[in-house]
Amino acid sequence: MRVCGDSPLLDINLIQKGIKCYNENNFDIVTNTLNRSFPKGQSIEIVNAGSFINAYAKIETTLEYYEHVTKYFYKNPDEFKIHNISSGENAGNIQLSVDTVEDMNLIEKIIKQMKKPHWEYTWKEVLKIREEVLK
């Protein structure tokens, strides 16, 4: 499983959904980053270890591939069984990851409005809090 450290408000339900989908099927990778419909900061990837090892042996030794270790899968979709989970929403342009100081400030404001631990919130609940904070 791959999740990024810049995603402090990641919905654990997405992880569970991805793992369930992976376990019930024969995919090389289950993701929600293709045709992005979840906010940035809600990205998950469940990768078959054998497929990852095979892909890793083929990747270019550039920083781009070391930082984005699953990029080879997406650049070579004919080699892999890739499944994308969609939210059914158009939320792919919403920022919930921490890439800038401004992002960090927003995340801090969101967390301060939470009445329970952040991992107990769904991504949709986090979006509602975000909307309130941005008013």
Image (tube, rainbow, N blue to C red):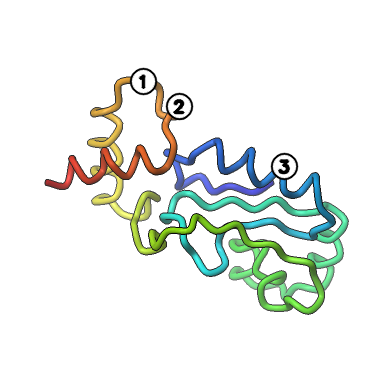
Q: Nearer the viewer, residue 11 or 20?
A: 20
Which residue in the structure is indicated by mark 1?
116
Question: Which residue is depicted at the point 22% across and 46% down?
Answer: 131
Element class at badge 3: helix
Residues packed near mark 1 inside 10 Å, few (<14), some (14 to 19) or many (20 plus):
few
* Front label number (3 vs 1): 3
Q: What's the CA distance linking mark 3 and mark 1?
A: 26 Å
Q: Amino acid at mark 2?
A: Glu
Residue 120 is tagged as 2
The relative height of residue 61 versus residue 69 in the rendered view (above or below) is below
Residue 57 is tagged as none
Q: Amino acid at mark 3?
A: Lys
Q: What's the CA distance linking mark 1 and mark 2?
A: 7 Å
Element class at badge 2: helix
Residue 20 is tagged as 3
Q: In the image, residue 12 lies at what x, y percent?
A: 55, 36
Q: Amino acid at mark 1?
A: Lys
Would you say the residues marked 1 and 2 are in contact, meaning their CB atoms lie under 8 Å apart?
Answer: yes
Q: What's the CA distance linking mark 2 and mark 3?
A: 19 Å
Q: In the image, residue 19 lies at what x, y percent?
A: 71, 43
Element class at badge 1: loop
